[in-house]
C-alpha cells in the first residue's frame, strides 16, 4: 500500500474514526462494507471516503465493497499502530490516573513504560500497570529507555519547561493534555493537543440548534 | 448575524478552535487580524476561513481584517456560550474528578449544577465547586432542576442505560466520555463523544511520518 506525502490533517484525523467503526464491525463478525454504508455510519459522503482511502493507494475494488479485515489492517499499518512505540506519562493527578487506569495504550499503538510525579505520596505506588517514579528520575530514565512519546498531564504552568526538557532528551512526540501552548507547538516534534473545551463548545452549539428546531416546530 | 441551517460538522468543529486562538489574541491585547494571519495560526487556508465565517453571515470587511473582539463575540453567540446552559456530571471517578477540579465549565457555556456517584465514600463530599450526591437522587434532581446536558464519566457498561434514562427525563445533550456507543448515538439528542484514542492514533501517525522524514534525510 502506497502512502502519499502531505496527506491533509483533516484526512489524518478521520483515520482513527474509520478504524474505530471498522474495528467494531469486525468484532461483530462483519466482513465487507461498501463506501456508502461506511459513509452513513460516519456522517460523511461515499465519495469523500473513497478519496480519503485513495490517499493511501485505495483498499478495494469499486463495486465489491471493502474487506473490513483488510481495511483494519491497512489503517493499522498507515497509523503505525503495530510499531510498538513507547510512552511515558508525566503527572499522576486525576487525569493522569484516569489514563493509567482506564486507557488502553497498547491497542492505540503504544506501550506505556512508566509514570512520573513529584508528589511523594504517589511516588512508588502502582497505578494501572505501571509504577510511579519521582520526577527527578525522569530525564535519566528517558536517556536510558528512549520512549518515543510523552503524555503530559501536569498543570499548565509546568508544561512548557517540561516539554522542552523532554524533547531535548530525545522524545519525538507529545500527547498534550495541558492546554495549547505556543511554546510546546514550537518544539518541532509532533504534538497532539487534547482540548476538552472544543468538544463541549461543539455540544453547546448542537444543543442550541436542537432547541431552536424544537421551538420552530408547529 | 445570520446563521445558516445545515452548517457542516467540519465547520462547527472548527469554531471552538477559532474561538480558542482568538481569545488568546484578545487576552494579549490584539485587536485586528487578517484571514491570512488567522489561517497561518490554524494551519488552514484564508479562503477556508472566509467561507466558514460566511456560513454565519461573515464578520468583517475584506481588506480591513477582522475585529478580534467582534469575532469572539460572534463566535460566543453562534456557539451559544452565553446562554448559561446547565449541566450535571455522572461518575466521580478519576476522570470525573479531573473535570470537576480543573475544567472551567462556565467559560465553555455551561454552569455545572451537581455531580452524582454511587460510591458511598465519595457521596456527600465536595469536589471542585459542587457536592457529590448519591446516584439514586439523579432522576428526581433532573426532573426538578432540568439540566440541559449531562456529562457521562461512568464506566462503559453503565452508559447506555444511564443515557437513556437521562434523555427520558428531559436531558437534551450528552457529553460522553464513556467510549462511543451506538445506543447513545441513537437517542435523538446531540451527543459529543470524547475519544482519547482518536487523538493518540493521530499522534502515532505523525510520529511515524516524523521518523520517516528523519531517516530519509541524507
Image (cartoon, coloured by chain):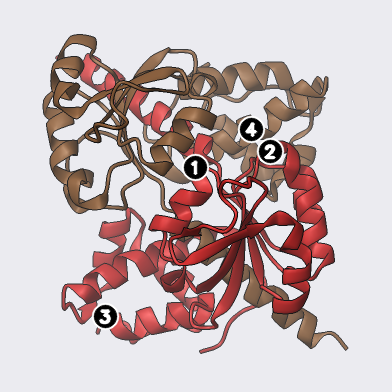
Chain colours: A brown, B red
Q: Residue at x 78, y 41 (%)?
A: A36
The subunit carrying tag 2 is B
Q: Residue at x 13, y 37 (%)?
A: A164
**Label 4 environment density (alpha carbons within 10 Å; few <14, some 14–19, many ≥20):** some
Closer to the observer: label 1 or label 4?
A: 1
User: Which mark identifies residue B156?
Assistant: 2
**Label 3 environment density (alpha carbons within 10 Å; few <14, some 14–19, many ≥20):** some
The location of residue B36, given as percent across then percent down, is 27, 66
Instruction: Please state if A168 lies on the left or on the right of A91 as rendered.
Output: left
Q: Is residue B12 visible?
A: no
Q: Residue at x 56, y 49 (%)?
A: B122
Label 2: state its secondary structure.
helix
Q: Is residue A172 visible?
A: yes
Closer to the observer: label 2 or label 4?
A: 2
The residue tagged 4 is: A20
State the image quarter where residue A191 is shown.
top left
> Which of these two is toward me, A203 or A121?
A121
The location of residue A111, given as percent across then percent down, is 42, 16
The residue tagged 3 is: B65
The location of residue B199, given as percent across then percent down, is 46, 39
Label 1: state its secondary structure.
helix
Q: Is residue B31 above or below residue A110?
A: below
Q: Are marks 4 and 3 in contact (CB under 8 Å)?
A: no
State the image quarter where residue A69 is shown.
top right
Q: Are marks 2 and 3 on the same chain?
A: yes
Amino acid at each position: 500500500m502506497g502512502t502519499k506525502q502531505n496527506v491533509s490533517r483533516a484526512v489524518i484525523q478521520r483515520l482513527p474514526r474509520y478504524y474505530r467503526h471498522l474495528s467494531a464491525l469486525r468484532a461483530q463478525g462483519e466482513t465487507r462494507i461498501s463506501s456508502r454504508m461506511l459513509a452513513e455510519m460516519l456522517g460523511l459522503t461515499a465519495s469523500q471516503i473513497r478519496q480519503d482511502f485513495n490517499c493511501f493507494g485505495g483498499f478495494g475494488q469499486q463495486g465489491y465493497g471493502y474487506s473490513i479485515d483488510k481495511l483494519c489492517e491497512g489503517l493499522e499499518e498507515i497509523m503505525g499502530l503495530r510499531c510498538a512505540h513507547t510512552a511515558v506519562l508525566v503527572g499522576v493527578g486525576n487525569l493522569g490516573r484516569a489514563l493509567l487506569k482506564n486507557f488502553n495504550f497498547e491497542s492505540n499503538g503504544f506501550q506505556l513504560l512508566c509514570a512520573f510525579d513529584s508528589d511523594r505520596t504517589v511516588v512508588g505506588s502502582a497505578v494501572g500497570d505501571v509504577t510511579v517514579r519521582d520526577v527527578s528520575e525522569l530525564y535519566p530514565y528517558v536517556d536510558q529507555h528512549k520512549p518515543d512519546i510523552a503524555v503530559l498531564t501536569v498543570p499548565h504552568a509546568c508544561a512548557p519547561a517540561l516539554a522542552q526538557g523532554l524533547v531535548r532528551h530525545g522524545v519525538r512526540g507529545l500527547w498534550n493534555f495541558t492546554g495549547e501552548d505556543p511554546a510546546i507547538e514550537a518544539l518541532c516534534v509532533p504534538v497532539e493537543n487534547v482540548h476538552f473545551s472544543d468538544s463541549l463548545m461543539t455540544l453547546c452549539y448542537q444543543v442550541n440548534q436542537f432547541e431552536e428546531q424544537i421551538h420552530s416546530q408547529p
